[in-house]
Amino acid sequence: MQILERFVNFVDSLSDKIGYLVGWMTTLMVLIVFYDTVMRYAFNKGNVALQELEWHLFAIVFLIGAAYTLKEKGHVRVDILYVNLSEKTKAWIDFLGMFIFLIPFSVMVILSTKGFIMNSWAIREISPDPGGLPARYILKTMIPLGFSLLIVQGLSEAAKNFMVIMGYKRQGDES
């Protein structure tokens, strides 16, 4: 169990660092949106690159931040029945959910976007809009990166649930 606990601590620490970075990226995105909005509506000056940067940052925040959100249990779930279950039953549901839904779906996304991303890199894809951002292929690479991080965090969550199922108390757990 100590190996599992070290794995969990490593992955959770990585997710925390990424979550911190994503938090700052979100702040930057809000500032850019604010600036862009003021420039467009107050001074009638739009900027295509700035608008694309907004949605590029949003995509990165969404993709890279998903693993941190999973760690923090921030994803939407319907708790009508789940909330009244025992901790062990919840752990079983979450453990199986990782291997039945999350990990297979994430692998499917990674595999199905491989050609799409490789093609983007091969042609060094740029924005089709005049004045848009270059290197769109880097943004598209965030898809497998984000889902890979989600798989790793899913394995960490599965390990935590496995420890609950086995009755193991992690160091620092108050429960």
Image: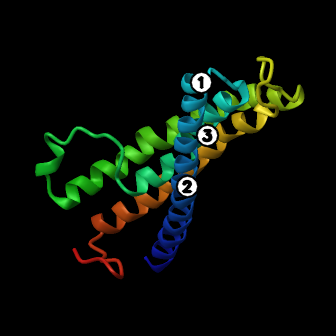
- Residue at 51% x, 38% y is 104
Residue 64 is situated, as x and y percent measured from the top left of the image, at 57, 47
Name the image colouring: rainbow
**Helix, strand or loop under label 3:** helix
Against 165, residue 120 (above or below) is above
Q: Earlier in the sequence, mark 2 or mark 1?
A: 2
Q: Disc 2 marks which amino acid?
A: Trp
**Helix, strand or loop under label 2:** helix
C-alpha gap between disc 3 and disc 1: 19 Å
Against 146, residue 112 (above or below) is above
169 relative to 12 in the view: left or right: left
Closer to the camera in the image, 129 or 108: 129
Q: Which residue is mark 1?
A: 40
Q: Which residue is mark 3?
A: 57
The C terminus - image quarter: bottom left
Q: Disc 1 marks which amino acid?
A: Arg
Against 139, residue 125 (above or below) is above
- Residue at 54% x, 29% y is 37
Q: Which residue is mark 2?
A: 24
Closer to the camera in the image, 103 or 127: 127
Residue found farthest to the left: 84
- Residue at 73% x, 29% y is 49
9 relative to 161 in the view: left or right: right
The N terminus - image quarter: bottom left
